[in-house]
Image (cartoon, grey):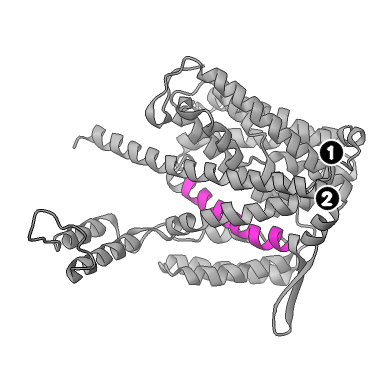
Amino acid sequence: MTHAEAISNAEENQSGAFQRFFKRITQGSYPLFLAAVTALVWANVDMHSYHAVWHSELSVGLGPALLTKTLAHWIDEALMAIFFFVVGLEIKRELLVGGLSSPRQAILPIAAAIGGMVVPALIFLAFNAGTPTAKGWGIPMATDIAFALAVLSLLGNRVPLGLKLFLSALAIADDLGAVLVIALFYTPSVHVGYLLASVGILGILLTGNLMWIRWTPFYAFWGAALWFAVLGSGVHATVAGVVVALFIPARGKFDTDTFIRDVQYHMGQFSCEEESCGFSILLNPNHLNTVQAIDLCCKDVETPLQRLEHALQPWVAYLVLTLFALANAGLDLGGLDWAGALGDSVTRGVALGLVLGKPLGIFGFSFLATQLLRAQLPSGVGWLDILGAGMLGGIGFTMSLFVTGLSFSSPEVAGNAKLAIILASVLSGILGYVVISRAAVGRPALAGGEGHGTS
């Protein structure tokens, strides 16, 4: 095999892995959308029961240690830590082998992500600076990767693979920025004792990683301990999820050469008297043992990072985010003062930050990166595609709702922010779809979605 063929095969394998990731994320948007609609319907049919369910108290404890929170708080602070853990795994994977793995690849999506955070925040502050609501500046900074990629998937294989890669890397860099914002700016006070305990637990996790510990319960136990320590420190506990993910090993027990050698040996153990082995696994103990041995080889070569990401993604998509949307997306539209809400500074700041600030920031900073840092657009991607991706970046549903809960304690102000998030996300999705559809006119549809040409 020539060097060029090897590179081509590697690119095809990376493309296949990304397409599987893209499909999983896109499918995860369906239950999230259904949960959001259900929450809106429920809140408008019976707001009292909606409030009663999610604000009922739940206590968890062992012996004298008892922790009591509302059901909504358990979802936002405990279950969402699992979501942030998966986000952390995705960030680490992107930094190691994905769109953020090399400076040349990372320049464009990171610049776009920075622009997509800074400009919306500035637009929000333009309406709210100097007021108590100014602390909501982080709300329009986020991009919901599931919904954004779901809208992109509606365009089928006329969307260049490079655009999907760009939007995914952008959204993951955006998530990293959101986590840093939450940790640095949405922590009202810090308890030094718990913070020191958190540092000590991080030392244990680092030691486990350096000692090549691949045992998942080790990271689960100390990850839970870090969650409790971070919760007590005053920093939002979900940040612990991302931090733990960064210590999950990204190397398997055996290298690929060992895996190939062992699998080839075990494959050699298959022998059949006739031309076809048929369904001989249960009938032939040697075949059954061989299959089990190959299965163990696969587990030994697979990295804990891959294993955990693949195992947890369905739980996050179908349980964690579904419950989060049910508990947070409820808004009594019938009882809303629409004139007051639409004229409110929070509503305007969030809505314009997402609908206008996101595409301006993403497009503008991407253009500056190509001019000043010599970044290049992905293959087959034109500037109209980048503008459309920036509009899809305005879909800020999950993380924007999450930051809203951290920003405002007033139900009325939080309700205005939620209204803006919902309206802006829907509008951004429509605009992004229309613009990328326009960019796709005349673009050939190829298998795998690798269109070519510029817009």
Q: Does the magenta stretch include residue 93?
A: yes
Q: Which residue lies furthest to the top in this view?
A: 442
Q: How many labels does the image show?
A: 2
- For the question of whether residue 236 can be seen, the reply is no
Of the pair 423 and 307, the residue shown nearer to us: 423
Q: Badge 1: how crowded within 10 Å, few (<14), some, or many (20+)?
A: many
- Out of 142 and 277, give the one closest to the viewer: 277
Amino acid type, label 2: Phe
| Amino acid type of the residue that numbered disc 1 sits on in the rendered structure | Val
Residue 102 is left or right of residue 182, and the answer is left
Tag 1 and tag 2, C-beta contact below 8 Å: yes
The span picked out in magenta is: 73-94
Who's the residue at 82% across and 61% down the image?
Answer: 52
The spot of residue 343 in percent (x, y) is: 89, 32
Disc 1 is placed on an element classified as: helix
**Residue 446: x and y, percent?**
39, 25
Q: In the image, is residue 432 above or below residue 7?
A: above
The quarter of the picture where the N terminus appears is top left
Predominant secondary structure in magenta? helix
First in sequence, mark 1 or 2: give its number. 1
Which SS class for mark 2? loop
Q: Which residue is identified by label 1?
A: 346
Q: Which residue shows up at 56% across the image and 61% down it?
A: 244
Residue 376 to residue 349: above or below: above
Instruction: Residue under label 2, please give it.
Output: 408
Residue at (34% x, 36% y) in the render = 11
Give coordinates of residue 44: x percent, y percent.
82, 46
Label 2, residues with CA under 10 Å away: few <14, some 14-19, many ≥20: some
Mark 1 vs mark 2, CA separation in Å: 11 Å
Spot occupied by residue 106 in the image (x, y as percentages of width and height): 50, 37
Q: Quadrant of residue 263?
A: bottom left
Q: In this view, does 179 lie above or below 428?
A: below
